Amino acid sequence: MTRVLDARDVSYSYPDGTAAIEAFDLTVEAGERVAVVGPNGAGKSTLIQLLGGLIEPDGGTITYFESGAPADDLRDRIAVLPQHPDEYLFNSTVRDDLEYGPAQLSIPKEQARERVASLADRLELTALLDQPPFRLSGGEQRRAALASAVAVDPDLLLLDEPVADVDADHRERVLSLLDRRHEQGETQIVSTPNVDLVPQVADRVVLVDSTGSVVADGPVTEVLADRSLLETCGLEAPTVARVFEMAGVSDPPLTVAEGAARLSDLLE
Ligand SMILES: Nc1ncnc2c1ncn2[C@@H]1O[C@H](COP(=O)(O)OP(=O)(O)OP(=O)(O)O)[C@@H](O)[C@H]1O
């Protein structure tokens, strides 16, 4: 199996001296879906930018695809949805932004157009393609930035809070796109403070505390079931788990779908 990402002893401080990431290690194999979960200010966004090669670490190494190539030489294989997507939508129309990545990689225009049309359809952006990106709402910008990131058809996709400010209908569209891409072999790393989202986007969780230290790294079902560990990081168990716990269930479900299945068993 290919090791898609190997980050060793990575550190990063902002120019004002804030030490955002210290001695961070993470290894991700091909096809994994990893959620980096932790409270506000833990360093998740900084980490996504570092792992996606948008900023350079002060110390440590990040190796992609077991090669010595830096992220900037792998823009056909690595894509990032950053926390503030508006900073990365800079063309005069949404269509130009979505076609920008494929054009940089010399993907034939016709192929790029088809890809963009299909993504726009899946994320319900078609009616917005001729708009300037700055006119889009926050949720629309996030969907446009996601479409722009995946338009290059990367092998490794890093996503910073992919459904923040996205409404319920469009959240389903985003999650279904991510599921499909994962089924096709894409490796995904998602950062979020939202524990409820984790089972929907990941199989493995890296839990970080407020200082950015990794306090757990394991299967979603194990890490999210450890309530005291979550509390150490200022996080609660998933909402559905708390509801079942309040009702006296000792091994509560972690997702709404599991909760619904348990309830229908109970009601039979
Ligand atoms: N441009 C910056 N200059 C200085 N410090 C910064 C800058 N951006 C972030 N920080 C600091 O770095 C630390 C990590 O911030 P980061 O945004 O990575 O956290 P986060 O886990 O993504 O938080 P959130 O869940 O609120 O998005 C915080 O202490 C933050 O205040």
Image: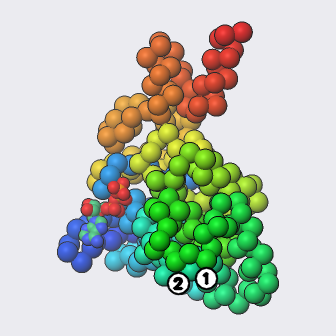
**Residue 204 percent location from the top left of the image:** 57, 47
**Quadrant where the C terminus is found in the figure:** top right
Q: Residue at x 71, y 63 (%)?
A: 121
The quarter of the image that holds ligand 1 is bottom left
Q: Which residue is drawn at 57% across and 26% down?
A: 253
User: Looking at the image, how many numbered discs can be counted on the residues?
Assistant: 2
Q: Which residue is drawn at 30% across and 50% down?
A: 210
Q: From the viewer's perspective, is residue 145 above or below residue 227?
A: below
Task: Identify the disc placed on residue 217.
Answer: none
**Quadrant where the N terminus is found in the figure:** bottom right
Q: Earlier in the sequence, mark 1 or mark 2?
A: 2
Say if disc 2 is inside 8 Å of ligand 1.
no
**Residue 158 percent location from the top left of the image:** 54, 64
Label 1: element kind = helix
For the residues bearing labels 1 and 2, Cβ distance under 8 angstroms: yes
Query: Is residue 7 found left or right of 233 in the rendered image?
Result: right
Task: Identify the disc placed on residue 96.
Answer: 1
Q: From the viewer's perspective, is residue 47 above or below residue 103?
A: above
Label 2: element kind = loop
In the rendered image, which residue does mark 2 sit on?
91
Q: Residue at x 64, y 31 (%)?
A: 257
**Residue 58 percent location from the top left of the image:** 34, 77
Say if disc 1 is inside 8 Å of ligand 1.
no
Q: In which quarter of the image is residue 41?
A: bottom left
> Is residue 104 in view from this perspective?
yes
Q: What residue type is labelled 2?
A: Asn
Observer-nearest of 258 and 223: 258
Observer-nearest of 203 and 10: 203
> Is residue 27 in view from this perspective?
no
Q: What residue type is labelled 1?
A: Asp
Observer-nearest of 253 and 12: 253
Tag 2: Cα neighbours inside 10 Å, few (<14), some, or many (≥20)?
some
